[in-house]
Every structure is written in structure tokens, then in C-alpha cells.
Image (tube, rainbow, N blue to C red):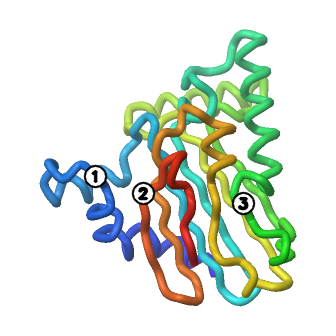
Amino acid sequence: MRHLLLALPFALLPVIAHADEHHHHDHHDEHASLGSHEHGVAQLDAALEGTVLEIELRSPAINLLGFEHAANSAEDKRKVADVRAQLEQPGRLFGLSAEAGCKLDEARLESPLFAGKGHEHEHEHEHEHEQHDAGTHSDVHAHYRYDCSTPDALTGLDLRALFEAFPGTEKIQAQVIGPNGQQGKLLRAKQAQITF
């Protein structure tokens, strides 16, 4: 199952590139920009195979938190904790239909901003600095694995609640693989659904 999600960004590049409304960029630039750290833009990959649904969300931290620096103030730390709590309870963020009976098996969150304290935190901060130099700093990567008792009832994802929860997210480049094949779509708050 994992290999399906890993293949998605490459399999669907042309679909997403053509879905974007910025046709004034040349074709090569559109493809190259998909892996970049772009404020306001997140990427979501989903694969439904049998009863297993996997979802990966990758976003610059600023889309979710409103900042990208290490959380030093009490207010910033509270915001990080709130965002992490929301991401750890993804049920409503993806609009999964109740009829599908999807139960969360695994939720994994990764970000330099979620690092612990003490020596481990300093190591993460150094790692964040290295990532900053590489242009991929302060990203949030969330991976979810669901087991769905009635996968046929799962027709797609509805990300309206995700846009509402994180207003800094303006666009989501969504790519899915499901029973009807694969597709990509550029989602916005007012057009936030993608079907399997």
C-alpha cells in the first residue's frame, strides 16, 4: 500500500499541472513547482486499496500555524499544541462518510516545530536549520492510515473543514488513487471535494 502513495506525486504531475489556473508558467516550471515549499499551498495524497485508506498531507507550517519559526513564546507553543491536537484527530478534516466505517489505525506527524525539549530539541533545531538551507524547513508532514469496513461507501474526500480549520491554506494539490483509477485536482475552500 505504501508504494501507491510514494508513486502518486510522479504519476499525476501532468494532471495537477494542467489543473492549475496559472497557465502563463511554462510546462516545466509547473512541474518543478509541485515539490516546492510554497506558502498557502499544501499537498494531499490519498490511496484507497481494498479496505485500507492512506492519506498524506504535506504543508508549510505557516499554512497551519501562521508562523514558521521555533515556538518560543507561550502563545506560539499553545498554537503548536492546538494544531498538533487537530492533526491528531483528523476525522472531520477529510470529510470521510460515516457509512464507510473508517477507523483510524495510525496517525504520524512530523515537523521540526513539533520537536521535544532539551538536547533533542537542540538537535531538531540544528536539523531544521539544515532543512532551511535546503529549502524544505518548517514543513508539516502528516500520515494517516484507516481501515474502512464499507469502502464502497467512501466516494471521496471533502476538505472544507480542513480549509476552515487552517485558513492560511489557500490551495491543496490533491492526488488520489481509488477503485476508479487515479486523478489529481487543485482544491480551494469553495471547491474542496475530490472523488475516488
Vertical comparison of 51 with 131: above or below: below
Estimate the x, y position of residue 117 in percent, counting from the top left.
78, 25
| Mark with earlier residue (3, 2) | 3
What label sits on residue 95 in the rendered view? 3
Most extreme residue toward the top is 73
Q: Are marks 2 and 1 in contact (CB under 8 Å)?
A: yes
Structural distance between the alpha carbons of marks 3 and 1: 25 Å
Look at the numbered disc 2 and give the secondary structure of its residue: strand
User: Which residue, given by chain and number where applicable, does mark 1 sit on?
Assistant: 21
What label sits on residue 186 in the rendered view? 2
Neighbourhood count class around disc 3 (C-alpha, 10 Å): few under 14, some 14–19, many 20 upward? some
Look at the numbered disc 1 and give the secondary structure of its residue: loop
Neighbourhood count class around disc 2 (C-alpha, 10 Å): few under 14, some 14–19, many 20 upward? many
User: What's the residue type where badge 2 is placed?
Assistant: Leu
Structural distance between the alpha carbons of marks 3 and 2: 17 Å
- Identify the image quadrant of the N terminus: bottom right
Structural distance between the alpha carbons of marks 2 and 1: 9 Å
Which residue: 37% across, 53% down? 35
> Viewer-proximal residue, 44 or 152?
152
Asked if residue 88 lies left or right of residue 43, the reply is: right
Asked if residue 189 lies left or right of residue 119, the reply is: left
Estimate the x, y position of residue 105 in percent, counting from the top left.
84, 68
- Identify the image quadrant of the C terminus: bottom right
Most extreme residue toward the front is 190
* Residue 51 seen in the current view: yes
> Viewer-proximal residue, 115 or 52?
52
